[in-house]
Image (cartoon, coloured by chain):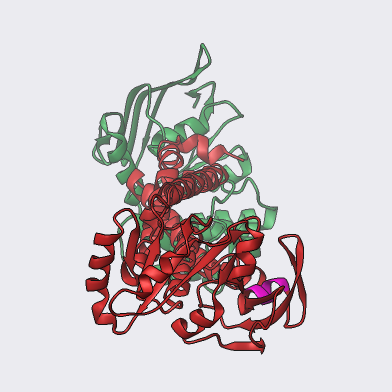
C-alpha cells in the first residue's frame, strides 16, 4: 500500500513534469496570485502575448486555457499553429491535426482508457467533439481543442490560464526572466526547470501529510496483522512452547524463535508488497492510464521493508512475552 | 544425602492454589534413587505421581522440602538454573509423545541438541541407540506419518540424545496398544540395562511397573510403601 501510494504520487508528478517539458517552452508565465500548479481558470489577458513577443530573444509566445471537465480531468485550449512550432509538433498515432471547430486531439493514454479512436466522438462541455487525432502522450495535455473555441465555451474570450515563451537560445533564459520580472512585478515567471521542480511532493498541498497518513496506516495494519497472527500462533502452539520448555529451551531461545519467524514474515511480506506494486502498476496502466500513473520506487523498498519489520516486531512483542512466560506444565496440558 | 543417590527427595510438599483454595498435591514425599536404577511410580489418579514428575523435572518448584539431583537442590535453583538442568541432566518422555508436528523425526531430535547447544551430528553411540529403538529408517518422516509406537520411540531418542543422567517417563505406554507398549517397555529396560540409564517411570499400569527394579506406590500425595 505504502509503495503504491508513493509510486502513484511520484508517477503522477513525473507525468506532469514530462508533459510540461513537452510544451517546448523555456519560460512559463502564470498570472498574479495564482497557484503555481493549479492549472485552471483564465485570469490573464491574452494581450500580454504581444508584450512578450516584443521582448528581446523571444521567438514564440503563446498561451493556453485549461478548463475542468469533471473529476480530475481538464481540457486545454491551444493556439495550435504556434504550439506546434514551439513544441516541435504532435506525433499522430491515429488521424491527423484539427482542421475545424468541434474537433479534439486526445493522447494515446486517454484514448486507451476510454477506448476511443480517430473519428469517434466525445461528449464534453455540452457539445459533441470529433476526435481528429490520437497523439503520443507528453505534449502538455491529454485533451486539446482550439484555443479560441475553448475561450468562448469557458466564457474566457481574450483570456489565458498561462503563457509560454520560446527563446532564440535557451542560454538567454535567465536574462529574459530577469527582464520580465522587472517589468511584470506580480506575475509568476518561471524557467521550465524551475516550473517542473515545483511538481514535487512538498509543493502539493496535503500530499506529504497524505503519504504520512498512509505510512502510519501501513504500520498500524502491519502491527495488527502480525499481532493477531502471532497471538493466534502462540495460542495454537502453546503445547509446542511447553515441549520446548521441557527440553530446556530458555526464554531467550523461544523469543528468538518467534522473532525470527516474525522477521521472516515481514521480509516475505515486503517482497510480496514489492511484487504487488508491479501488479498495481500493470493494472493501472491497463485500466486508467490517463487518470493515474504509478512509478516503481526502489529507493522506498528498504524504507518500506524497515517500516514493516518495525511494525511486525512491535506486533510480536506481546505474543512473544506471553509465550516466554507461559507455564510449562499448563502449556504441556494444552489441547 | 548419601552420595550414592542420584535423586534424593526429603519432605517434599507441593500445594496448588485453585482459586481461593489450597490443594495439597504432595504431602511429604521421601524417596531416594541410586544411579542406574529403574523405578516405577504407581498410584491412582490424583495420587501425586505427575506432580512429583513435574517437580523432579524442574518444571514446577516445590512448595517445601528438598529435591536433590546430583546433590544440587532444585528448591534453591532459579528458573534459569532449572531450565539449564533440563537441557542435559534430565530427559522427558510423555504419554502423548509431545513431538513437534511440523518437524521430522530427525529435526525433533536435533532441536533437543540445538537447545542444549550441542553439535547436531548424531554420534556413533547414538546411532546404535537408534538401531536399538528401530527408528533409523523413520528419521525423515513427520510424526503424523508414524504409528504411536514409532512416535514414542522417537520421543525416547530425543530424550536421551544429550545423554541425560535421568530419564523421566510419564505414562510412556498410556497411549499405546499392547504390542507397542511391550516394545517401548522393553526398550526402556534395555536402555537401563545396557547403558545404565537411570529411569523414573510414572504409570498407573501395575503390569508395566513390573519391568522396573523397584515399584514405588503413591496415594494421596504420599508414598505408601
Give the percent coordinates (x, y) of residue B102: 55, 60
Q: What is the quadrant of residue A123 in the picture?
A: bottom right
Q: Residue furthest top?
A: B20
The hue of chain A in the figure is red
Which chain appears green? Answer: B
Along the line of sight, the residue nearer the viewer: A126 or A224? A126
Q: What is the quadrant of residue A49 in the picture?
A: bottom left
- Say if B71 sits above or below A159 in the image: above
Along the line of sight, the residue nearer the viewer: A115 or A101? A101
- Say if B19 sits above or below A248 in the image: above
Classify residue B35 as left or right of residue A219: left
Q: Quadrant of the N terminus of chain B?
A: top left
Give the percent coordinates (x, y) of residue A127: 76, 64
Q: Residue at x 59, y 60 (%)?
A: A67
Q: Main SS type for the magenta part?
A: helix
Magenta segment boundaries in residue numbering: A110-114
- The answer to whether residue B167 of the structure is visible from this angle is no
Classify residue A6 as left or right of residue B183: left
- Say if A252 sits above or below B130 in the image: above
Q: Residue at x 61, y 48 (%)?
A: B173
Q: Residue at x 40, y 42 (%)?
A: A317
Q: Is residue A111 magenta?
A: yes
- The answer to whether residue B103 of the structure is visible from this angle is yes
Along the line of sight, the residue nearer the viewer: B183 or A116? A116
Give the percent coordinates (x, y) of residue A200: 38, 60
Along the line of sight, the residue nearer the viewer: A276 or B61? A276
- Say if A298 sits above or below B97 in the image: below
Amino acid at each position: 500500500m505504502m509503495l503504491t501510494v508513493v509510486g502513484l504520487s511520484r508517477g503522477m508528478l513525473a507525468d506532469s513534469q514530462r508533459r510540461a517539458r513537452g510544451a517546448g517552452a523555456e519560460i512559463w508565465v502564470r498570472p498574479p496570485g495564482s497557484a503555481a500548479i493549479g492549472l485552471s481558470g483564465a485570469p490573464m489577458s491574452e494581450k500580454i502575448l504581444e508584450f512578450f513577443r516584443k521582448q528581446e530573444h523571444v521567438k514564440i509566445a503563446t498561451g493556453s486555457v485549461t478548463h475542468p471537465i469533471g473529476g480530475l480531468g481538464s481540457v486545454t485550449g491551444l493556439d495550435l499553429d504556434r504550439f506546434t512550432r514551439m513544441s516541435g509538433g504532435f506525433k499522430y498515432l491515429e488521424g491527423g491535426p484539427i482542421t475545424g471547430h468541434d474537433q479534439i486531439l486526445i493522447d494515446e493514454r486517454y484514448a486507451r482508457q476510454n477506448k476511443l479512436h480517430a473519428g469517434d466522438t466525445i461528449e464534453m462541455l455540452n457539445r459533441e467533439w470529433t476526435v481528429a487525432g490520437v497523439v503520443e502522450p507528453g505534449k502538455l495535455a491529454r485533451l486539446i481543442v482550439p484555443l479560441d473555441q475553448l475561450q468562448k465555451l469557458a466564457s474566457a474570450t481574450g483570456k489565458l490560464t498561462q503563457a509560454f515563451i520560446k527563446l532564440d537560445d535557451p542560454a538567454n533564459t535567465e536574462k529574459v526572466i530577469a527582464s520580465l520580472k522587472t517589468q511584470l512585478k506580480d506575475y509568476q515567471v518561471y524557467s521550465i526547470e524551475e516550473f517542473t521542480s515545483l511538481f514535487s511532493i512538498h509543493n502539493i498541498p496535503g500530499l506529504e501529510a497524505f503519504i504520512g497518513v498512509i505510512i502510519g496506516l501501513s504500520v498500524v495494519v502491519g502491527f495488527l496483522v502480525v499481532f493477531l497472527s502471532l497471538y493466534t500462533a502462540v495460542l495454537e502452539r502453546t503445547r509446542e512452547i511447553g515441549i520446548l520448555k521441557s527440553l530446556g529451551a530458555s526464554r531467550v531461545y523461544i523469543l528468538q524463535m518467534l522473532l525470527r519467524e516474525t522477521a521472516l514474515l515481514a521480509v516475505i511480506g515486503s517482497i510480496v508488497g514489492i511484487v504487488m506494486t508491479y501488479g498495481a502498476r500493470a493494472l493501472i496502466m491497463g485500466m486508467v492510464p490517463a487518470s493515474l500513473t504509478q512509478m516503481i520506487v526502489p529507493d522506498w523498498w528498504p524504507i518500506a521493508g524497515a517500516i514493516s519489520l518495525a511494525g511486525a516486531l512491535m506486533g510480536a512483542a506481546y505474543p512473544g512475552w506471553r509465550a516466554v512466560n507461559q507455564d510449562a506444565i499448563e502449556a504441556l496440558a494444552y489441547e | 544425602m548419601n552420595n550414592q543417590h542420584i535423586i534424593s527427595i526429603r519432605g517434599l510438599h507441593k500445594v496448588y492454589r485453585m482459586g481461593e483454595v489450597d490443594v495439597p498435591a504432595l504431602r511429604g514425599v521421601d524417596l531416594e534413587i541410586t544411579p542406574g536404577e529403574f523405578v516405577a511410580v504407581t498410584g491412582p489418579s490424583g495420587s501425586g505421581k505427575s506432580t512429583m514428575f513435574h517437580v523432579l523435572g524442574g518444571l514446577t518448584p516445590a512448595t517445601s522440602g528438598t529435591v536433590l539431583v546430583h546433590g544440587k537442590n532444585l528448591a534453591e535453583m532459579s528458573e534459569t538454573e532449572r531450565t539449564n538442568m533440563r537441557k542435559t541432566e534430565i530427559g522427558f518422555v510423555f504419554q502423548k509423545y509431545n513431538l513437534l508436528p511440523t518437524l521430522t523425526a530427525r529435526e525433533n531430535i536435533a532441536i533437543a541438541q540445538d537447545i542444549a547447544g550441542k553439535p547436531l551430528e548424531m554420534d556413533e553411540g547414538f546411532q546404535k541407540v537408534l538401531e536399538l529403538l528401530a527408528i533409523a529408517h523413520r528419521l525423515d518422516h513427520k510424526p503424523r506419518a508414524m504409528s504411536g509406537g514409532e512416535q514414542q520411540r522417537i520421543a525416547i531418542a530425543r530424550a536421551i540424545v544429550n545423554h541425560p543422567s535421568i530419564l523421566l517417563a510419564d505414562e510412556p505406554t498410556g497411549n499405546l496398544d499392547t504390542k507397542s507398549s511391550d516394545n517401548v517397555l522393553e526398550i526402556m529396560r534395555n536402555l537401563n540395562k545396557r547403558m545404565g540409564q537411570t529411569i523414573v517411570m510414572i504409570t498407573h499400569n501395575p503390569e508395566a511397573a513390573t519391568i522396573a527394579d523397584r515399584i514405588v506406590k503413591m496415594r494421596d500425595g504420599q508414598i505408601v510403601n
